[in-house]
Each structure stands twice: as C-alpha cells, then as structure tokens.
Image (cartoon, coloured by chain):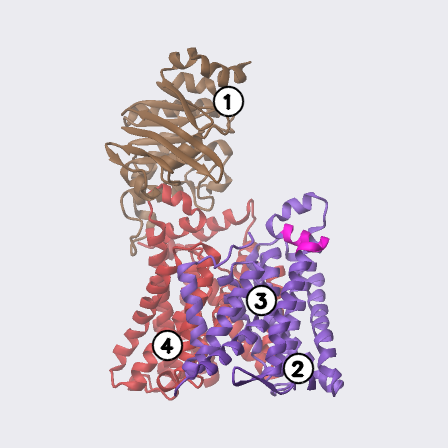
Amino acid sequence: MTLGVAEVASQFLVGISRSMILFVVCAGLSFILGVLRVPNIAHGSLYMIGAFATFSITKFFPGTTGFWVALVVAPLFVALISLIAERVLFCHLYQREHLMLLLFTFAVSLILGDLVKIVWGAEYRSVSAPPLLKGSVSILGASFPRYNLFLILMGPIVGVALWLFTTKTKIGKISRAAAVDREMVGVLGINVSWVFAFAFVIGCFLAGVGGALVAPTVSITLGMDHTLIIEAFLIVTIGGLGNMWGALVGSLIFGVTHSLGVLFWPQFAIVFPYMAVVIVLLVRPKGLLKSVW
Amino acid sequence: MLRVESVFKAFDDFMAVNGASLDVKKGEIVAVIGPNGAGKTTLFNLITGILKPDRGRIVFKDEEITYLPPYEICRKGITRSFQIVNIFPRLTVFGNVQVAVLSHQRKSSTLFRPAESLAVEETKAILEVVGLLDKEKEIAGSLSHGDQKVLEIAIALGNEPELLILDEPTAGMSPEETFGAMELIKKLAKMRGLTILFCEHDMDIVFSIAQRIMVMRHGETIIQGTPEEVRNNKEVQEAYLGEEHA
Amino acid sequence: MFERTIRSRAFWPLCGILILLFFLPLFAPRFYVYIFALIYVTSLAAMSLNMVVGFGGLFQFHHGVFYGVGAYATALLLAKTSAPALVAFVAGPITAALTGLIIGWFCVRLTRLYFAMLQISLGSLIWAIVFRWYSFTGGDDGIHGIRMPSFLSSPQSAYYFILVVLTVSLVLMYTILKSPFGNTLQAIRDNPQRCEAVGINVRRHQLLAIVIATFFAGIAGVLFVVLERSVFADLLFWVLSLEIFIMCLLGGWFTFLGPVLGTAIIVSLRTFVGKFTEYWTLILGILLILVIFFLPEGVMGYLQRLGGPRPKGSAVRKEEIDASGGVGL
C-alpha cells in the first residue's frame, strides 16, 4: 500500500481532531488533579454519561437543535451529578489520605457505570452529527469530515476559555493557588472545601463536554469509561500533573500516534500511543511539562 | 579521619553551605556549633550522602566519599542520628536496633530464617549500653521523646561505626535526660574508641564534652579549634556566643 | 524455629480450617468447590500484591499484569506447544518474575505516584499488545479449552492441587515476611531514609521484593489456568488490578491473612449477588464506599480492634500481630 502525503496528512488531522476531545477531558482531569491532588477515576464514567445523555437529548430534540442543546445540557447534567457526589460524600474525605480519595472515585465510577447500564441498557447507541456539521470538505486532496474541523476548533476554544478562567477570574486564581499551597489559601480565610468542590465540578463538567463532543464520532457503549480513563491518566501524566498545557501536549501525542498507527499498522493501532507514553515516561518520568505542585 | 574540604551547597538561590571545612581526627570528639540556619544539618547531610555538594570534597580515611549514596557511606563506617526523631515507630525498640545490626552483618536480605533469632546478643548489648534494655519489647512509637532520642543513637550504633555523627542529640530533652545523654556520649567515646562528631545548641554540653569545636555561620566555617580558642575568638563571640549569653 | 507461631492463638484454628477445606469436595456440591477454588486462586494473587503494598509500601497499582503474564505464559505453552505440563507450570511464575524484574527495575527508581504511573503505562502496553495480537494470544477472545495433564482432569483434583499450592505458597510467604528480608522490607516501608542511613540498599531490596511478589502472582496465574482452562485479556486490564487492591484493603493490608479474607468476602458476595441481579458492580461500589468510610483498616483491622484495648493507634497493632504469631487473626 503506497501512502501518499495526502493520506498521511489527512490522517494526521484526524489524529488532531481526536486529540481535541481527549484534551477537553484531560484538561478537566488535570485541573482536578492539580487542585485536589487526586486522580479522579470517575472521570471516565462522567464522560460516558455525557455521551449517553447527548444521545437521549438528541432523541428528545430531533432535527437541527438537538445536538447543540445536548452540548450545553449534557455537561451541566454531568456537573450536577458530580456536585451531588461531592457534597454528599466526597467532601468528608478531604482530611483522609489520598489513597482513600482515589478509591472513592473508583467506587463512584463503579456505581455510575452500572447506573448507566440500568438507565440506558447495554446496547450500542449512536448519535448523528447536526446537519451543519455533516459531510466532509476536501483538504489537500483528501476528504475530511466537517465534524473533525469542528473538533479542531472546539479544542482551542475550550483551552483558551479554561486558561482565561484560571488566570483572569478570581475563583480561577484561587483554584490555582490552592493547587500549589492549600494551607496558605486556608490561612487567607478562604473556605478550601468550597474551592475543592468548585474545581471538582468544573473538571467533571469538562468530562461531560468531552462526552458530548465524542458522541457523534463513535458507538456509545458501556466500557467507554474504562478505556478512556486509563488513556486520560497516561495523558495527564506524560503532560505533567495538573498542567493544562501538558494535557494538550499529551493529548496530541496520544491522538496523533493512534491515528498514524491506524494508517500504518491497523491491527496494533492502539499499541502506538501506549508505546509513546512508555517512552516518554522512561525518559521523563515526571512528565514533559512542569507539574503544578 | 574525616576531612571536609570547602564544600558548597545551594538550594535554588540560597547558599546553605558556603565553603565550609572540617577536620576530625580519630578518637576525637568534635562539636559543630552555630546559630540556627548556619548550615549544620546540611553539612551533616552532605557528609552522610543524603545531599551531594555542588563543589568541594569529603574524604574519610583517605578515601573520597563525596558522591557516594547514603547506604554505602554507612558501610564505610559513618553512621548518624537525626535531629528530628527518625526511628521506626511501628517496630519494637529491639526491632529498631536489630534492623541496623542485621544490615551491618549483611543479613538484611536473608530469606528463610526467622528474624527473631538473629543478631539477638549484639542487639541486646547495644540496648544495654544505652540503657534501653528493659524497654526492648515496647513499641518505639510509644516511648517518651527523650527515650526516642536515645534510641536514635542506639540505631546508629548498630552498624559498629567508626565515626558517629549526632545531630542535636539532646534537642527537646529534659535536664535529667540531657545529663544522661551527655554521660552516654562520653561513655561511647571511651568504650569503642568511637570518633564522635555532633552539633548542639546547648553550650554547656558542647564545652564540657568537645575536644575541638568548629563554628559555622551563614554556611561558612569561622574557626575550628579547642574550646579555649573558640571562647576567646572575637568573631565567634559577637556572632554567636554574644547573642546566646547576652 | 517457629515456636511462637505454633503457640499463637491462631495456629490451631487455622489448621482446623485447613483440614475442613481438604474434605470440602466430599460433602459440598460442585459449584461450591469451584467457588472455593476460585477464592484460593484470587487470594494468592491478592496476597502477592499485599507483599509489596501492605508490607513494602510500594504503589503497585497494576499487579494484575504479572498475574496475567503468568497465566498467559502457562496457557500459551500448553495450548500452542506440546511442552509437558510441569514445564508450563514452572514457566508461569518465572515469566511473571522476569516481567516483574524488568518493570520493577524501571519503577523503583521513582517515587510513589510516578512509580505507579510508569507501572500502569507499562502494564497497559502489555495489555494492548496481548489484546490485539489475535493470532497469538487469542486477543479479545482469549484462549479456551486448554489441555491439562491427566492428574488434574477432574474438578476435585484441580481443587486439591490448587489448595496444596496455595498452602505451600502461603507458608513460604509467611517465612519470607518473618525473615530479616521481611523485617527490612517493613522498615523500608516505614522509614526509607533511616534504612539508607543504616546501610540498606533500599532500591535493591524493593526490587527483590517485587520479584518475589510477582513470582507468587505468576503462581496464582498458573492456578487460574488450572481452574478455568482458559485465559482472557481481562486478566491484564487495570480494572482487575484495582479489584485485587480492594480485596487487600477490605481484608486489612497490615495483616498477613487479611487479603485472603477480603478476597473471600468479595468473591462470595459477587457469586451470591450475581444470583439476584446483574448489577454486581454497583454493589461493589457501594461496599467500597462503606469500607472507606467505616472500615479503613479493613475487616481484619476492625476485628483486631474489637479484640483488645488500644492505647495507641497503629503502633500497637503491630504488637498484637507479633503476639498472635504474626498471622493477624
């Protein structure tokens, strides 16, 4: 099989668009990791709920508006779930060691995973892209789905929004400060517990956004959560813990190596990104960019 | 026996140790004194391999040990006790010292013999010397602070060192405990011909035990000499003793 | 040599339980024999994990990899070659320990969280390769119908084999944990800096602990193949590793037999709950939350606390463990 430059470049772009979804999810995960210092294993489940919720919402609002409504409502729904989990249970554990927090998020992911099975059943679901984004355009002589262009646009938008949020708004700056030195923030009279709640909900909201964005591109299934969370973790680690730009770099590495893997060795496509992660971690165990702590 | 030659150590912009030198002869008791932040603990960390100097050399028995890892430096014959109590809180007093003794006998990795039957006499001997034998079965974490500091020293003895480094051995002790620790240090120096290097804030102890004193300030060595020389040195007086005894 | 153990409160009851278990196939229905055997296999995996996590303090978050590698090594030799069964059985733990040596060598140089992440990434890489290499490993489907030597052909004989191997392995592990090696390992867990200062090469010791633990994990993998006559890629997936971790936690990871108890609870519950509902994962999640909030020391730790007055926290627990012969009951 001869590979023209056009095919490789096109696949490269596909990789970047997939990376954008990963980036949105990982930015949220990284944010939570930075502020709470806990890996949120439930992140994958929330992503999955975002996708399934998008499915339901598009069924409820057929036609052109469905997807756009879902893009807003599904993440809000996910954020609500995370807020409930946090205020009812999670916040009581903040004094405990990190391992307990991690196991709590794992427990939540188990529960949410089965809840999804109860509510939506075990069948594959699918969502179609809104009419505006259907079809493809021709780039470099190869056809490129419009939806992927949309993703390549959304990624930076979310990134910039998050960056503006953490650097320009008061609560964003407090979150960043809490990531570096939570005791100091407490000393300043700020309720650290609320900062944590806030950071957790924002991070989970992003997981929901990721789920909504991915919905038209894959079959929505149970088990999405498990595959995603391990990828998200590895991405966040190679990027640098808590570092949003690191999440971007990591997502790009992961998404592009996967896409190129699909092109060059389809059977083992998934091995490429894992290999890349291993190489990065062997060379720079603490991640490529500086971690927030 | 030990020679520290102009070592430097910086943490980001802060020069913790700024060209300090030290000379310890076999069988001596040498004290390092200086105000808080003078770099004494950093210096000890450099000698025992926990930190590596940016510049300078550390030589022990004519062998350069500057960049060796801590466990190798221990095997060369230098052990230490820590300023902040650093024992094994979950093990018994006996177990604490036994870890060191087994390590010295190179039996730490023995797989198929029960630990409780090994190195018993040597461990008990050490506990007896420091006066903790009657408490050997107690959990180390439940001892009084003073006893824990003595246990620190006992652990350091487990490796039969030639040079024993004590980092503020009487910090936080009551006057009786301090006196006991002092006697212990003197006894140890005599018994095994141990060379002892220690740092302290309590000047009474320093001047009554140490044969030579090295004074540090801002990471530098101001002077190293006999107690008389140090007491009479003007720089030392104004920098340190003056503040302390004003 | 082990007088204290034999004189401890726990020894004779345990022997009694062991004898009972030996007679189990004679009076219990097949299904229960299978469940008990499954508990033995999984608890061996959990015990091997506890060696490095509970006693060594290492963040071994992807231990399942070594369990799975051991299982696959045996399975592949039995299914794809005509190697004698004994060779295949021995190859399991050896392959697992080798994998442990390689992965461990890279990981011990890192601290805690980074240790965990590197291990997870290496483990996931292995999973991905096995998962996709359909022609060799059976990929998603796994390998089924693996041949067994004639002396293991019946479920009863498989049960006895597994029980014997488990018992021998536990005795070995106990000996190792009571030896200077085990003591040093726990000392490293509690205070690695002090250990360095007394001349212990902490990294080498930790690596040795990993190799030993993964060796036993490999044995558990072999037993899995004996029991199920198949292997699945799921053995290498991170979810199983975390489940084994939870079994240790539930049982009590500062005690010797805690993981066995935790495994027994979870496997029994899973089987029992499975009869009524397919939403076992939901129940497990709720159970885990209950453990986190109310039983952070695990069931074993909780029982120990019931058993005696407690002047000081975890420090005294160790004393009780020693007093009871280290078995932790």
Q: Nearer the viewer, mark 1 or mark 4?
A: 4
- Give yes or no for residue A173 being in the magenta stretch: yes
Are the residues under badges 4 and 3 in a single subunit?
no
Q: Which mark is residue A26?
A: 3
Tell me which chain the residue with mark 1 is part of: B
Q: Are the residues tagged 1 and 4 within 8 Å (C-beta)?
A: no
What chain is colored brown?
A: B
- Name the quadrant containing residue B168: top left
Residue C323 is at least partly visible in this image: yes
Q: Label 3 is placed on what type of residue? A: Cys
Could you say where residue A293 lies in the image, as x and y percent from the top left?
55, 51
Residue indicated by mark 4 = C71
Q: Nearer the viewer, mark 1 or mark 3?
A: 3
Q: Which residues are magenta?
A: A167-178
Rendered shade, chain A? purple
Distance from the alpha carbon under mark 4 to that under mark 2:
33 Å
Residue indicated by mark 2 = A118
Q: Nearer the viewer, mark 4 or mark 3?
A: 3
In the rendered structure, the answer to whether residue B48 lies left or right of residue A179 reads left
Could you say where residue A250 lies in the image, as x and y percent from the top left?
51, 66
Q: Which mark is residue B175?
A: 1
Quarter of the image that includes the N terminus of chain C: bottom left
Are the residues under badges 1 and 2 in a single subunit?
no
Most extreme residue toward the front is: A140
Distance from the alpha carbon under mark 1 to that under mark 2:
70 Å
Could you say where residue B55 lies in the image, as x and y percent from the top left?
36, 36
Residue B210 is at least partly visible in this image: no
Give above or below for A177 relative to A246: above
Tell me which chain the residue with mark 4 is part of: C
